[in-house]
Amino acid sequence: AHIELPSSTIRLDRLLFAEGGARILVSVPSNQLAAWKQEISDSLNSSLGAVYAMPLGSVVSTGELVINQGTANLVQLPVSDLRSVFESAIPRRMDSHLESEHK
């Protein structure tokens, strides 16, 4: 994915990792983007309540996660590296915990 974060006065770690409010991330195929935008627009005029949406980026096939904010490149990492770190996180923690118990 290539993500473009909006300018903000919020601390970067909070912007990237904080949880709050009801939010979802939606990936819309490019051939359905106009219909998606219309649905969002229609919700603004609905008596059921508005849905607010903000485009953040696009899914790409480069094999990298890129996160920018303005001219600042915040993250540019291969997805394979991210996958490896994610998949080995618990075993790595367990190994280090077991090693410290045996010292």
Image (cartoon, helix red, strand yellow):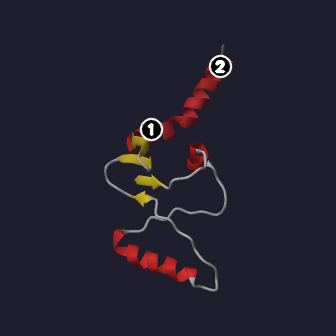
Position of 81 relative to 55 (above/below)? above
| Residue at 37%, 46% in the rendered image | 64
Position of 37 relative to 15 (above/below)? below
**Residue placed furthest toward the top:** 103
Precedes in sequence: disc 1 or disc 2? 1
Q: Which mark is residue 24?
A: none
Q: How many marks?
A: 2
Marks 1 and 2, how far apart at CA: 23 Å
Q: Secondary structure at mark 1?
A: helix
Residue 29: quarter of image: bottom left
Say which amino acid is labelled 1.
Ser
Foreground of the two, 76 or 73: 73
Say which amino acid is labelled 2.
Ser
Task: Report crowding for label 2: few under 14, some 14 to 19, many 20 or more residues within 10 A (C-alpha).
Answer: few
Measured from the top left, where is residue 95 in percent x and y? 58, 26
Residue matched to label 2: 100
Residue 72: quarter of image: top left
Measured from the top left, where is residue 103 in percent x and y? 66, 13
Foreground of the two, 7 or 13: 7
In contact (CB < 8 Å): disc 1 and disc 2: no
| Residue at 45%, 75% in the rendered image | 36
Task: Report crowding for label 1: few under 14, some 14 to 19, many 20 or more residues within 10 A (C-alpha).
Answer: few
Position of 81 compared to 10: left or right?
left
Foreground of the two, 36 or 52: 52
Q: Secondary structure at mark 2?
A: helix
Residue matched to label 1: 84
Position of 11 relative to 51 (above/below)? above
| Residue at 50%, 40% in the rendered image | 86
Measured from the top left, where is residue 82 in percent x and y? 45, 41
Measured from the top left, where is residue 91 in percent x and y? 56, 33
